[in-house]
Image (cartoon, rainbow, N blue to C red):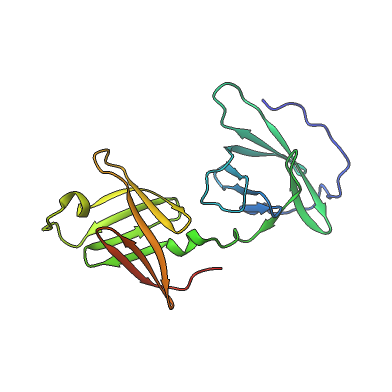
Amino acid sequence: MPPPVVHTPLSLDPMEEYELGQWWTNGRQMLRLDDIGFYALYGEMNRYHKPIQRGKWSRQSYAVLWLEPYEELKTEWIRVQVSRIEGRIALTIPKMQPMFSTERPPPVMEDNLLGQWTSDKGTLFISGNLRYTFTPASMDIDHPGIVAGHRGAWRLDGDRLLLTPDPPNMGPFEFRLEEEAEALRLRGAQMTFDRNATLAH
């Protein structure tokens, strides 16, 4: 169980009803609160990078949230203060500046990768949960290890897209993200994928 709540005067009316959005930020860090009670705390403004903390969250009262990080050795509850700053609901995590609700995270380069990409050798679908699916156009190719359908994880390193297939016998694939006019291209050693899109800035 979490430690006892220490009540402090807050600029928040206990009778006031308010909604907790999914995304919160202070311009340096971000917090994602899922409806099913899980959270992710990011040490930067890119949600595609690994969170610095994951766990469960719960609402203790109108002015307090609890974060329960996943911890192998111990359970450490973090008290998050809910207040109103300059008329806006704010969440304050210890040692961090107050966070305010935002409709969506700021756009980053990874956003341009999401969706379907096409090639004469198949289609590549990249999802926002850092997973991808490759579906070959045909299996009748000289390099079945390359064109066989597979799924796996993806990440962007600069302008390099790295695909790591789930099958352990398949090595990683690397593609270069290129922009020509308003078209995006993923250029690899064995295949190139195209998609008409405009880069988010």
Residue at (49% x, 70% y) in the render: 199
The answer to which of 145 and 106 lies nearer the viewer is: 145
Residue 95 position within the rendered picture, expressed as x and y whole percent measured from the top left: 75, 39
Q: Quadrant of residue 168?
A: top left
In-image side of 122 versus 90 (left or right) = left
How many discs mark residues in the rendered view? 0
- Percent x, y for residue 175? 35, 58
Which residue is situated farthest in the right direction here? 9
* Up-down relation of residue 2 to residue 195 (above or below): above
Res. 140 image quadrant: bottom left
| Residue situated in front as seen by the camera: 155 or 65 | 155
Q: Residue at x 59, y 40 (%)?
A: 52
Q: From the viewer's side, name the closer residue of 109 and 10.
A: 109
Which residue is farthest front? 189
Question: Which residue of the protein is positioned furthest toward the bottom in this rendering?
Answer: 181
**Where does the image place residue 189, in percent across and percent down from the top left?**
27, 58
Above or below, 129 against 122 in this view is above
Q: Specify the quadrant that holds the C terminus.
A: bottom right
78 sits left or right of 11 in the view: left
Q: Position of residue 104 (x, y in %)?
A: 60, 60
Residue extending furthest toward the top:
73
Identified at 33% across, 63% down, the residue is 187
- Residue at image point 62% right, 33% down: 68
Question: From the image, which quarter does the N terminus lie in?
Answer: top right
Q: Is residue 159 left or right of residue 69?
A: left
